[in-house]
Image: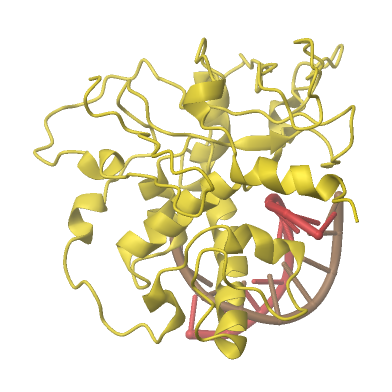
Chain colours: A yellow, B brown, C red
Amino acid sequence: MKEDDSNWFSKWEEQLPNPEELMPLTQTLITPDLAIAFDIGTSNTPHNHHHHHHRSLQQPSPISTPSSQHNSGEFDSSDLGGGGGGGGGGDEPARTLKRPRLVWTPQLHKRFVDAVAHLGIKNAVPKTIMQLMSVDGLTRENVASHLQKYRLYLKRMQGLSSGGGGGGGGGFGSGGDSATDRLFASSPVPPHFLHQPDNYLPYMPAAALQQQQQQHHHHQQMAAVAVAGHHLHRHFGSNHQFLSRQSLQPVVHRVGTPVHNSVSSSYVDDLESAQEKKALTLFPTGDD
DNA sequence: CAAGCAATAT
DNA sequence: AATATTGCTT
């Protein structure tokens, strides 16, 4: 029996490239206008009239999508977002702008799980998780939706497996694992997730609580947001994945806060289940 | 308003 | 299928 395409696809998932490797980080992917136009609205920012809308939501990433193995670096990213893209005449699409669907890559999910783990179940609410993840482009709703699903996944698991559940690579319902579960299963589930949320870590989350949507730091953080231009099809031809990075804003960021943002830097993503034990230093504290 | 959750929509 | 969105409750 030959392993069908799913095989390479699976491997691709696991070996998921880190942003650093793929992203030359040549330019800001999301323009400030766009950024504020979109996600900030989640909290407040009633209305900013900005008649300037760039539609450069995504750029043709140099990334070879799994399917485009032999991509020639063509940018067919085309419209996307609508930005209206090319819409032609109308350049007032800002109102109807829709964000592309977020693709939860294993790496991104890992970040999500890490955030939840470090926050504790109790403090792990969408807004906080979102802030802790520090991923540009992530909205509260993105997280909320994912969190909901994730909780269902956890519950589902508590029922059938007490032992294999958390194991990275564990978690396989006997016959009940859907592809969705594969995503969730790709990251190690902290043990206390599966139990009753007894009061753990009564302290510590303080450092994590930052109020700011706008990111600061002009350094490498990890932002791996992939957006689907169209429906995801794992077929050759049309499949674009874009890794976006943090968009740096010219915003003056105050250093007056005695609290260090070590939050973001405290993250160390390690791929434990990876075949390769390449320890990814997402936050090279040394290169600073 | 934010969060949680089920149902529903795309 | 995977996410987003909506409705309703807390």
Quarter of the image for residue C2 reads: bottom right
Q: Is residue A133 left or right of residue A18?
A: left
Residue A48 showing in the rendered view: no
Q: Is residue A272 above or below residue A262?
A: below
Q: Is residue A57 above or below residue B6?
A: above
Identify the residue at image location x=61%, y=13%. Answer: A52
Q: Residue at x 43, y 75 (%)?
A: A193
Q: Split into 4 quadrants, where in the image is the C terminus of chain A?
A: top left
User: Relative to residue A18, is residue A133 depicted above or below?
Assistant: below
Near-viewer residue (A97 or A202): A202
Q: Is A176 left, or right, of C8 in this rendering?
A: right
- Quarter of the view holding residue A84: top right
Q: Position of residue A88 (x, y in %)?
A: 87, 12
Q: Quadrant of the N terminus of chain A?
A: bottom right
Spot the residue most to the left: A258
Along the line of sight, which residue is nearer the eye, A124 or A201? Answer: A201
- Percent coordinates x, y for residue A21 in the rendering: 51, 23
Task: Classify residue B2 by image quadrant.
Answer: bottom left
